Amino acid sequence: MNKLTLKSLLTETRKGFEDLLYLAMDRRIRLAVTGLNQAGKTVFITSLIHQLLMGARLGGLPFFRVVADGRFQGAKTVLQSSMDIPAFRYDQFIESLKGHPAQWPRATDGLSEIRLAIRFRPGGLLHTRFKSTHTVYLDIIDYPGEWLLDLPLLGQSFNDWSNEIFALCKTPPRETLSRPWLTYLRQLQPLQPAEEGVLRQASRLFTDFLLACKREPFGLNYLQPGRFLIPGDLKDAPLLTFCPMPATERLPEPGSLAQVMAQRFESYKELVVWRFYQQHFSNFDRQIVLVDLLKGLNRGPDHFADMSRSLKSILKNFDYGRSSLLSRLLQPRIDRLLFVATKSDHVAANQHNNLERLLRRIVMDSVNEAAFNGVAVETMAISSIVSTETVVKEYEGKRLSFVRGCPKGRSEEVLLFPGEIPEKIPRPEEWHTERFNFLEFEPGSPMDDGDGRLNHYRLDLVLDFLLGDKLA
Ligand SMILES: Nc1nc2c(ncn2[C@@H]2O[C@H](COP(=O)(O)OP(=O)(O)OP(=O)(O)O)[C@@H](O)[C@H]2O)c(=O)[nH]1
Ligand SMILES: [Mg+2]
């Protein structure tokens, strides 16, 4: 072997070794996307993928550092890794968003997943040492926020949970909506032997109550157990056939109504909640929670309070710095958690700061940030797909910010003044009728400046917070 070949062989070997070292670092990121019903999960994931596939190339992600540094080489969708999770149908969703006329994707339920390969050149020190390109595999998982609301059940006994539900049923609108179920429950003898017909009727009335809470005009979110609302293939299974029961004076005998209800609650925890935790939640690296605050404001104080309760409950799942039983049980490896207020394009651009501040107040004020052991928590106001334009105009001697867009169900654009977002949670006396009436819009058309990129607000900052360190 001549001197030159030996030298190049050694260089290659060293480079290969260094590359291996680099590759041994985290190459796979599992990014979980969640949010309550209709919060904007499908649109968010579709737009995020669209921006990565083409937006980066067209200058659409200026604050995503790997792009700004010129180290981003491209992204593409590849075969997903999980065999048993339905595919996230990016192809269908982007087609409807780019159609003529453009349409929002259909509602989805359950879990879905998609995998992207992102190619980039390492920056900083690594950049000078490694000339080669590296690939990170990004798995994006879409799952209903309602499942996240079930996780706290793992730390509750049947009695704790029942008491919590009965206490909630003392406040409107649950007080009225729970009446048929509670009236039926009062006629039952918890210590009597359980009959399947009674179990079924009690749980049916309880499920009807949960569904009535979820439906318009209430649209409540803090509803457990989550699978009672989205049962999927568990419909009519015994582990979805129970309901809260009043505590009994003596310990219920095996086979009694109270004991069977409690047993089914425990089975639900083990076979539904714990399984979701083990199979999915404990494997997530990063989590984003989408929140439709505007809908929350439109629906009034009861709904807003319920939404805030849900968000705080979601946050507790990550607060494993505290030494409760639940926190010892749940040690997710998630180290970055982002809450975003979605659909910020429904209001004028000068309101986005307030939208973000309001969200921050809800999720941050209730917790001592120091209690978050190693989890970086952040809040932002974003729009996955911008469907309106902010127009500043003189009106009765004042300069006001209007939005121009095509309201949902209409075919022509209008100019309207959506009003202001409060910076703080409004006090009870500030919720006068019609104070908030934010409209929804038909999807915006692709930007004219390139080959059909969809416009967004702050998805680049979202990407930088969630992935930036892995692409450094
Ligand atoms: N203007 C605007 N509207 C949005 C945006 N994202 C979502 N929407 C609206 O919100 C609706 C729901 O969005 P989805 O992404 O389907 O919400 P989801 O959370 O996936 O809903 P489910 O899966 O049914 O729970 C859409 O049909 C749009 O009307 C956005 O960035 N801008
Ligand atoms: Mg969806």
Image: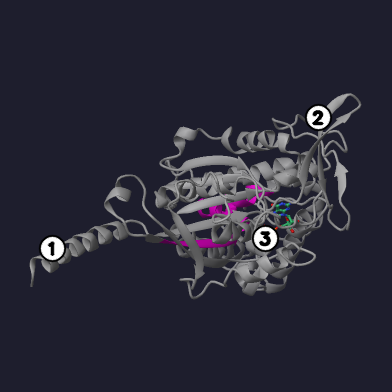
Dot 2: what SS? helix
Q: Earlier in the sequence, mark 1 or mark 3?
A: 1
The CA distance from mark 1 to mark 2 is 77 Å
Q: Position of residue 197 (x, y in %)?
A: 72, 73
Q: Nearer the viewer, mark 1 or mark 3?
A: 1
Q: Earlier in the sequence, mark 3 or mark 2?
A: 2
The CA distance from mark 3 to mark 2 is 43 Å
**Which contiguous range is marked in magenta?**
136-165
* Residue 220 visible in image: yes
Decide: few, some or many residues near mark 2? Use Cα within 10 Å; few <14, some 14-19, many ≥20: few
Pick the quarter of the image with the N terminus: bottom left
The CA distance from mark 1 to mark 3 is 49 Å
Dot 3: what SS? loop
Q: Position of residue 253 (x, y in %)?
A: 56, 63
To which residue does mark 2 refer?
Answer: 430
Quarter of the picture for ligand 2? bottom right
Q: Position of residue 424 (x, y in %)?
A: 69, 30
Q: Residue at x 26, y 62 (%)?
A: 20
Q: In the image, is the residue at mark 2 within 8 Å of ligand 1 by its beta carbon?
A: no
To which residue does mark 1 refer?
Answer: 7
Q: Residue at x 49, y 50 (%)?
A: 67
Dot 1: what SS? helix
Per the image, is 158 magenta?
yes
Counting every numbered tag in the picture gives: 3
Q: Amino acid at mark 1?
A: Lys
To which residue does mark 3 refer?
Answer: 452
